[in-house]
Image (tube, rainbow, N blue to C red):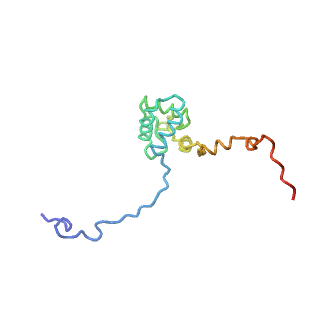
Amino acid sequence: MRGRAHDVVGTRPPRNYFRLRTVTALAVDVIREAELVRAIERTLVAHGKMPAEEALPTARMVLGYFGLDDTVLDNKLSSDDRDRFYRLEEEGLLTSEEEDATVSRGKTWRIHYWILKKDRIRDAGRDRTPKSEDADEAMYRDIGDSAWNRRGNPPPTPPAP
């Protein structure tokens, strides 16, 4: 049995054996697990509609259905997962749409599908807390102008030039 040239010990593979492929960067707008977990925590968990320990499994379940797509057919969902999708829809993280399709013999089927609301997910997951002030800055900022006068008198007006 004859081996190929690169199967023989001590020989190099032919020049074209390992081809370099040019990979073009695609601008894929993908929701990451951490983004969805944060959005779930700041909506469903914060509103008491889901325990905190369910945020990560729910995010994984959702991303498992969607993958890299923006939509998923409702028929693919289990009954329990559909209930969680409805809760996410109530918080604005998902939306559902339907479409009528004509099939054989002129019958019309209604197809239901779910759509990720990526902007809303990112908005809900974004930090909204302003930069914290230094404790000293906050204390001095809250002191009124009259406290800076030694005798409680208004400050003297500077002389006119």
Q: Residue furthest left?
A: 1
Screen quadrant of the N terminus? bottom left
Q: Residue 13 falls in which quadrant of the image? A: bottom left
**Whether residue 101 can be seen here:** no
Screen quadrant of the C terminus? bottom right
Q: Residue furthest front?
A: 151
**Numbered-mark total:** 0
In the image shown, does 133 or 9 lie closer to the viewer?
133
Residue 68 sits above or below residue 103 on the image: below
Residue 51 sits above or below residue 69 on the image: above
Residue 96: x and y in percent read 53, 36
131 displayed left or right of 41 = right
Residue 125 sits above or below residue 19 on the image: above
Q: Residue 97 falls in which quadrant of the image? A: top right
Residue 70: x and y in percent read 49, 44
Residue 153: x and y in percent read 81, 42
**Whether residue 124 can be seen here:** yes
Residue 131: x and y in percent read 59, 46
Residue at horizontal 16 percent and vertical 65 percent from the top:
3
Residue at horizontal 63 percent and vertical 45 percent from the top:
137
Residue at horizontal 68 percent and vertical 43 percent from the top:
141
